[in-house]
Image (cartoon, rainbow, N blue to C red):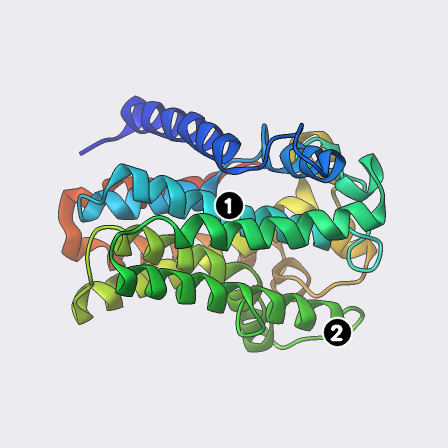
Amino acid sequence: MTNGQGFNDWMLSSQRAMEGALSSYLPSAQAVPARLHEAMRYTALDGGKRVRPLLVFAAGALFDADAGLLARAASAVEMIHVYSLVHDDMPCMDDDALRRGKPTVHVKYDQATALLVGDALQAQAFTVLSEGSGDPARTLAMVRLLAQAAGSAGMCGGQAIDLASVGKSLALPELEQMHRLKTGALLRASVFLGALCGKTLTAEEEAALDAYAKAIGLAFQVVDDILDATADSATLGKTAGKDAADNKPTYVSILGLDASRQLAEKLLEQAQSALLPFGSKAERLRLIAELIVHRNA
């Protein structure tokens, strides 16, 4: 369906569309309380690769999903992702001063504002998602999916395990469990939100997308760990080398660089194999998996 330059054009147009949708769904910086709304827009707009929205759009294309509903779902999942970054960067967690090439929210504003920005983005995500579909059952399913991916059985739970693991030695299955929650859950939700914008899935479709999402979820984190160990801060847009400096368990610290790179390629193969039942309609999802594994930032 698409490859090479065609995929790049689609990706850029999708990222531009995401910027416009986010801007429209976020409160105006002039609305009271203006400083909070300004900070929400500061962190959510003009930055990031928008991988999760791209997954929403690409999965939606499998089932000819409505463009307006996809934009809402993609905006909601990106707001959840951005809120998690704002909170992760705070001194009580990872204590980072740089994100997406600019000062983190607690540095640009203050810690109280950063806390409220995350809270408000999370609430706004569910407001946007809940207003999108004329089908109450589908809307409820999508809200439940995103809530579960963001909560203690997903992203927040993974972050809790991450914080509790600093300075400890984890076995590889324990590390995988942590990242299936911290990183993988929201990536999986992105895929399924996109699909649900089009239809109710069959058991076979759900199993195939689940296998794809689990593979890219782990691959994303493996590559993150590799980049943290090998890239510089200017390339990453965030502070490089923090995992080692903070004594965090990573794929690189457990497996080494070469084995981590081999694992990422193995996960890419698994992701692409999972998409075979969808044929050429899944080409964008395949290329997003390549983008995740072969990215340099």
In percent of the image, x 54 and y 59: which residue is there? 183
The kind of residue tagged 1 is: Glu
Pick the quarter of the image with the N terminus. top left
The residue labelled by disc 2 is: 164
Which residue type does callout 2 highlight?
Answer: Ala
Whether 102 is drawn above or below 59: the answer is above
Left or right of 60: which side holds 80? right
Q: Is residue 4 left or right of residue 218?
A: left
Q: Position of residue 81 (x, y in %)?
A: 56, 50
Farthest residue, direction front: 32
Q: Residues within 10 Å of mark 2 (few under 14, many from 20)?
A: few
> Which residue is disc 1 drawn over?
78
Question: Which of the two residues, 118 or 58, is positioned nearer the viewer here?
Answer: 118
Q: Give the image location of residue 126, x and y in percent.
A: 49, 55
Q: Please report the residue visible at 36 percent of the width from the left and 60 percent of the height from the top.
A: 142
- When the figure is inspected, residue 25 is found, relative to residue 193, above or below; the finding is above
Q: Position of residue 106 (x, y in %)?
A: 81, 43
Q: Which is more toward the observer, 225 or 262?
A: 225
Mark 2: secondary structure? helix
Helix, strand or loop at mark 1: helix
Question: Where does the image place residue 96, in percent across and percent down from the top left?
Answer: 79, 46
Q: CA distance from mark 1 to mark 2?
A: 26 Å
Q: Quarter-wise, where is residue 256 in the image?
A: bottom right
User: Taking 196 as reference, is 84 left or right?
Assistant: right
First reached walking from the N terminus: tag 1 or tag 2 = 1
Residue count near mark 1 (Cα–Cα under 10 Å), binned few <14, some 14–19, many ≥20: many
Mark nearer the viewer, 1 or 2: 1
Examine the rendered structure and indicate whether residue 185 appears above or below residue 108: below
**Residue 169 found in image quarter:** bottom right
Residue 290 in view: no
Quarter of the picture containing the C terminus is top right
